[in-house]
Image: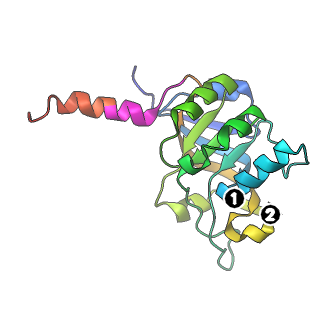
Amino acid sequence: MEMTMSIKKIETPLAAGDVEGLRIGEQVLLTGAVYTARDSAHMRIAGLIRENLPLPFDLEGSVIYYVGPSPARPGRVIGAAGPTTSCRMDPYTPLMLEHGVRGMIGKGQRSSEVVRLMQEHRAVYFGATGGAAALISDAIVEVTIIAFEDLGTEAVRRLVVKNMPLIVINDCYGQDLYARGRERWAAEAGPAGQS
């Protein structure tokens, strides 16, 4: 199966149909509200869910960006906003997906359990380019801290993004762009020791 190189424009909140139309390798321009959360925020949100307490934002159809942005320079709404390693959120992701999270943005591979649950809950994992934090911040037009301000850079923020450039890493059909890339490399490299 060849990966397409089309660019799709999608808006948050995401519906199942939005996610079902995406395939690994596709480039996406995302517009709308995105919520930031890293390890500590995920742990607190999971605690709120378990205690049946109000959440800082509606998880249904939401997109969470795994980022801890740097402070904004004068004239900017946010500083550098590059992705953090996503597997650190894997212990909390099943609960988030169960409660309606439809999209996640980060870098690096997800666990096989998270990939399986993305199929079950019709969710998608987007990759944001690591090392391009300043470029990514250009797509962020508004920032509001909405929860856990004591966490500093890891507080939950509501970002409004416009045409944020992303790539589909895991689609809701169980496909994995990283695995596909390794398979292609192995096929092109041939048996070990041969050029």
Q: Residue at x 48, y 47 (%)?
A: 108
- How many marks can you see? 2
Residue nearest the viewer, comparing 76 with 37: 37
User: Which SS does the magenta portion mostly show?
Assistant: helix
The residue pinned by badge 2 equals 148
Classify 10 Å Cα crowding around label 2: few (below 14), some (14-19), many (20 and above): some
Q: Residue 61 — which label?
A: none
Q: Which residue is drawn at 49% across and 52% down?
A: 129
Image depth: mark 1 or mark 2 in front: 1
Task: Tell me if label 1 and label 2 are in contact, CB under 8 Å.
Answer: yes
Q: In this view, does 117 lie above or below 141?
A: above
Is 162 left or right of 125, judged from the image as shown?
right
x then y, percent, for residue 6: 50, 32
What kind of residue is marked 2? Phe
Is 26 within the magenta? Answer: no
Classify 10 Å Cα crowding around label 1: few (below 14), some (14-19), many (20 and above): some
What kind of residue is marked 1? Ser
- On the question of residue 175 being in view, the answer is yes
Is 76 left or right of 125, judged from the image as shown?
right
Which numbered disc flags the more N-terminal residue, 1 or 2? 1
Q: What element carries label 2?
A: loop
Q: What stretch is highlighted in magenta?
A: 174-182
Q: Residue at x 56, y 56 (%)?
A: 83
Q: Is mark 1 on a helix, strand or loop?
A: helix
Q: Is residue 61 above or below residue 78?
A: above
Is 181 within the magenta? Answer: yes
Q: Residue 40 — which label?
A: 1
x then y, percent, for residue 185: 27, 34
**Which quadrant: the C terminus?**
top left
Q: Is residue 152 above or below residue 83?
A: below
x then y, percent, for residue 24: 50, 31
